[in-house]
Image (spheres, rainbow, N blue to C red):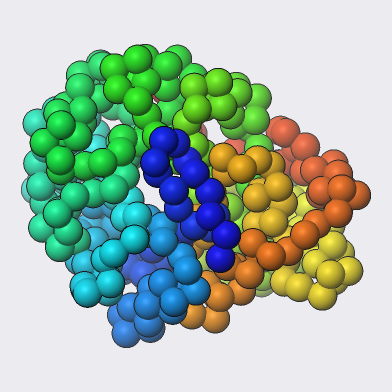
C-alpha cells in the first residue's frame, strides 16, 4: 500500500475503505448495494488492514448506528495506526430525519460514536452535510471544542461549498473535505478543489466508482434489477441518460482491457492521478471487491490513458444530475 497526507499529520493509505455498504443507510439494511454478511464484512476490514489500508470511513447514519458498531468490533485489538473517520449532523429522533449542525448535536454524536467504535478519540470527524440553519462558525466552533478535549483529532466537512469551506477553515483548520468525485462526477474541479488546495485541505472522494456504474457492471438499463435503488432513484441511470453515460464506461473498459485489469482499477487510478491530495474511499462489503480496488494504487496509467479518460468524461459531461432535485438542494452549501 502507498500513503498520502491529507493535512498536517493526518497520514492515511492512498485508498481508504468506505464501509457504508456493510450496513446500509438509515434503516435500509440493503441500501443500494444489497444485503451484507457481517462475517464477510469484518473479514473484509481485517484483510484491508493486512494489506496496509489504514483509513476507514463510516457515519452515525449508516444503519443508523450499526456500521459504527460493526467497525468497532472489527478493529478491536487492531486499532493501532488506523485512521477512523465518522460523521455527524443528522438527527432521527422518533423518526424525525433532519439536519442539526449545532455544537450540542456535535457533542452528542461524538460521544455516542466514541462508544460504538470503542475508541478513545475519533481521528477524523466530519460534518456530514452543512446545516443551513446553523452558522458554520458555530458548528466548527463546537467541533473545535471536541478537538481541545481530545475527543476528535481532525475536523472534516462533506459536500460543502467554497465560501463555507473558507469560513469553516477560518475558525479551525479543516483537514479534509469529503465530496463525490469520479469520472462520473467532476464538478468539484471547477470551484471546490481550487479552494481546498489553496487552503491545504485534503480531498476524500466518496462514490469514486460512480455507485458501481464505472465498474462496467451494467451494460444497459435492463441489466439493473428492479429491486435496485439505483434503477428508480438515480437520475443518471434513467432512460434518457443511461445510454449517453455508458459511453464513458466503454472508454474505461477499453483502457482496462489494454492493461489487463478491471474497470474499477482504472477508474480509481485515474482519480489517484489527479493529485497527491486525493484519497478515494471505494466502498466494499466483500474481500474480493476490496482487494481488487486496493490494487489500483499500483496501476500506472499513461499520460495518453489519462487524457483519453478525461476527454470521455469532461466536467459537466455526465448526463443527468447525481441526485434528485430535493437532495441536490443540500449539496455545495
Task: Please state the horizontal and vertical placement of residue 267, each as a whole percent of the image.
Answer: 69, 57
Task: Please state the horizontal and vertical placement of residue 136, each as a whole percent of the image.
Answer: 28, 19
Q: Residue furthest front?
A: 9
Q: Looking at the image, which residue is at 26% across and 41% down?
A: 153
Q: Is residue 171 left or right of residue 160?
A: left
Residue 158 visible in the picture: no
Q: Quadrant of residue 140?
A: top left
From the viewer's side, name the closer residue of 329 and 296.
296
Q: Above or below — where is 141 with respect to 84?
A: above
Q: Quadrant of residue 220?
A: bottom right
From the viewer's side, name the closer residue of 121 and 143.
121
Q: Looking at the image, which residue is at 37% across and 20% down?
A: 169
Q: Above or below — where is 237 with respect to 263?
A: above
Q: Looking at the image, which residue is at 56% across and 27% down?
A: 197
Q: Quadrant of residue 209?
A: bottom right
Task: Please state the horizontal and vertical placement of residue 99, each as a whole percent of the image.
Answer: 24, 34
Quadrant into which the C terminus falls: top left
Q: Looking at the image, which residue is at 49% across and 22% down?
A: 199
From the viewer's side, name the closer residue of 228 and 286.
286
Task: Please state the horizontal and vertical placement of residue 191, each as a whole percent of the image.
Answer: 60, 22
Q: Is residue 194 left or right of residue 37?
A: right
Residue 276 visible in the picture: yes
Amino acid at each position: 500500500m502507498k500513503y498520502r497526507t491529507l493535512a498536517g499529520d493526518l497520514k492515511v493509505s492512498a485508498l481508504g475503505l468506505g464501509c457504508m455498504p456493510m450496513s446500509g443507510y438509515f434503516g435500509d439494511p440493503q441500501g443500494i448495494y444489497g444485503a451484507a454478511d457481517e462475517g464477510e464484512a469484518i473479514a473484509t476490514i481485517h484483510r484491508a488492514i493486512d494489506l496496509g489500508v489504514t483509513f476507514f470511513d463510516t457515519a452515525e447514519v449508516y444503519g443508523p448506528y450499526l456500521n459504527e458498531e460493526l467497525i468497532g468490533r472489527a478493529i478491536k485489538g487492531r486499532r493501532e495506526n488506523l485512521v477512523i473517520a465518522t460523521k455527524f449532523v443528522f438527527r432521527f429522533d422518533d423518526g424525525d430525519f433532519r439536519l442539526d449542525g449545532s455544537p450540542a448535536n456535535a457533542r452528542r454524536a461524538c460521544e455516542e460514536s466514541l462508544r460504538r467504535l470503542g475508541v478513545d478519540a475519533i481521528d477524523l470527524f466530519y460534518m456530514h452535510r452543512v446545516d443551513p440553519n446553523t452558522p458554520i462558525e458555530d458548528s466548527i466552533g463546537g467541533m473545535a471544542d471536541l478537538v481541545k478535549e481530545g475527543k476528535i483529532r481532525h475536523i472534516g466537512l462533506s459536500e460543502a461549498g467554497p465560501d463555507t469551506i473558507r469560513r469553516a477553515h477560518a475558525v479551525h483548520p479543516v483537514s479534509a473535505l469529503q465530496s463525490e468525485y469520479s469520472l462520473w462526477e467532476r464538478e468539484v474541479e471547477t470551484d471546490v478543489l481550487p479552494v481546498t488546495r489553496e487552503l491545504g485541505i485534503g480531498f476524500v472522494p466518496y462514490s469514486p466508482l460512480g455507485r458501481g456504474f464505472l465498474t462496467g457492471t451494467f451494460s444497459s438499463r435492463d441489466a439493473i434489477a428492479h429491486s435496485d435503488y439505483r434503477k428508480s432513484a438515480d437520475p443518471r441511470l434513467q432512460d434518457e441518460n443511461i445510454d449517453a453515460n455508458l459511453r464513458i464506461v466503454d472508454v474505461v473498459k477499453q483502457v482496462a482491457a489494454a492493461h489487463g485489469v478491471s474497470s474499477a482499477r482504472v477508474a480509481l487510478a485515474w482519480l489517484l492521478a489527479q493529485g497527491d491530495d486525493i484519497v478515494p474511499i471505494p466502498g466494499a462489503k466483500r474481500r474480493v471487491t476490496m482487494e481488487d480496488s486496493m490494487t489500483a494504487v499500483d496501476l500506472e496509467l499513461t499520460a495518453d490513458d489519462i487524457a483519453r479518460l478525461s476527454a470521455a468524461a469532461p466536467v459537466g459531461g455526465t448526463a443527468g444530475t447525481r441526485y434528485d432535485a430535493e437532495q441536490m438542494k443540500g449539496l455545495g452549501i
